[in-house]
């Protein structure tokens, strides 16, 4: 039996209703239209808090989370901006990972923040940590302000049109980098009878 490579979506917010997780859901919707890989999800907030904080590698849930990272070929990591950096919840997970946990992997970072002021947190705070874990390629991140992730029914969040376009691009790049899929959707085929020559 061949094991399909996976894309792992990591949600780094401690909140149940989460804007950064909405970015991740949106990426998930885009990945679901493609085949050739499986999509897995890791909601860090669902891991046992004590095991996470005390780095209990032997705990089955922690071991399972590390195994998810290990088998992923591509990783999308979403975090809220907290105090001009990424969330502490994400940090405790990253601290648990082996030093070369992201070797050979492509990573797409996503973040939401209250304002545009800390949009560079992805680059100055998260990127160096991902780099230190030996990521092969860290793609340009997608940052959305709270105003760009709208609350809809049942306290759910939905990304606005401008962010949706950026996520479209980011997912195509992620698939091209990780699975050698075409980076653009290309042009619709033109029938030969409609081709006109100018000579
Ligand atoms: C403890 C805390 C610290 C925050 N710090 C910042 C910050 O420094 N800069 C910023 O732009 N937003 C900050 N915010 C706002 C959140 O980043 C923003 O609301 C984000 O969309 C929340 O994402 P989530 O719903 O996925 O948790 C902070 C929010 C909290 C609760």
Image: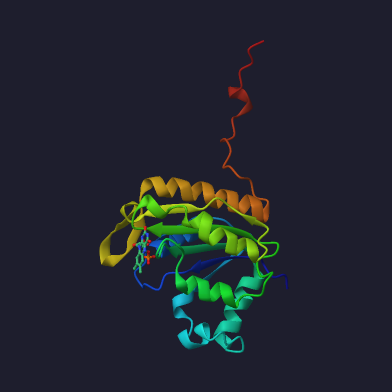
Is 131 situated left or right of 169 in this image?
right
Q: Looking at the image, which is closer to me, 182 or 123?
A: 123
Q: Residue furthest right?
A: 1
**Residue at 59 percent of width and 81 percent of height:** 64
Query: What x and y, as percent, mark residue 170?
Result: 53, 50
Which image quarter has ligand 1? Answer: bottom left
Depicted 50 relative to depicted 191: above or below: below
The answer to whether any part of residue 32 appears in the image is: no
Q: Residue at x 58, y 38 (%)?
A: 186
Image quadrant holding the N terminus, namely bottom right
Q: Position of residue 70 (x, y in %)?
A: 66, 72
According to the image, what is the colour scheme of the structure?
A: rainbow
**Most distant residue in the top direction:** 199
| Picture layout, residue 120 above or below residue 157 | above
Query: Which of 81/59 is in front?
Result: 81
Q: Position of residue 7 (x, y in %)?
A: 59, 64
Report the number of discs.
0
Q: Nearer the viewer, residue 145 or 91?
A: 91
Q: Quadrant of residue 62?
A: bottom right
Q: Position of residue 195 (x, y in %)?
A: 61, 22
Residue at figure coordinates x 46%, y 69% from the top left? 12
Q: Quadrant of the C terminus?
A: top right
Q: Which of the two residues, 150 or 147, is positioned nearer the viewer here?
A: 147
Residue 79 in sight: yes
Query: Image height check: is 52 above or below 68?
Result: below
């Amino acid at each position: 039996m061949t094991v399909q490579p996976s894309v792992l979506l990591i949600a780094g917010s401690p909140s149940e209703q989460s804007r950064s997780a909405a970015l991740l859901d949106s990426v998930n919707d885009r990945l679901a239209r493609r085949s050739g890989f499986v999509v897995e999800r890791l909601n860090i907030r669902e891991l046992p808090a004590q095991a996470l904080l005390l780095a209990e590698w032997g705990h089955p849930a922690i071991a399972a989370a590390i195994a998810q990272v290990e088998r992923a070929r591509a990783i999308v990591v979403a975090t809220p901006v907290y105090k001009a950096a990424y969330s502490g919840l994400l940090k405790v997970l990253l601290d648990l990972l082996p030093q070369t946990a992201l070797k050979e992997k492509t990573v797409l970072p996503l973040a939401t923040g209250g304002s545009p002021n800390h949009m560079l947190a992805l680059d100055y705070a998260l990127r160096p940590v991902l780099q230190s874990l030996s990521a092969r390629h860290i793609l340009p991140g997608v940052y959305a302000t709270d105003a760009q992730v709208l609350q809809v029914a049942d306290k759910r969040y939905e990304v606005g049109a401008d962010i949706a376009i950026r996520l479209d691009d980011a997912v195509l790049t992620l698939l091209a980098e990780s699975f050698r899929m075409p980076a653009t959707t290309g042009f619709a085929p033109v029938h030969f009878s409609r081709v006109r020559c100018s000579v």
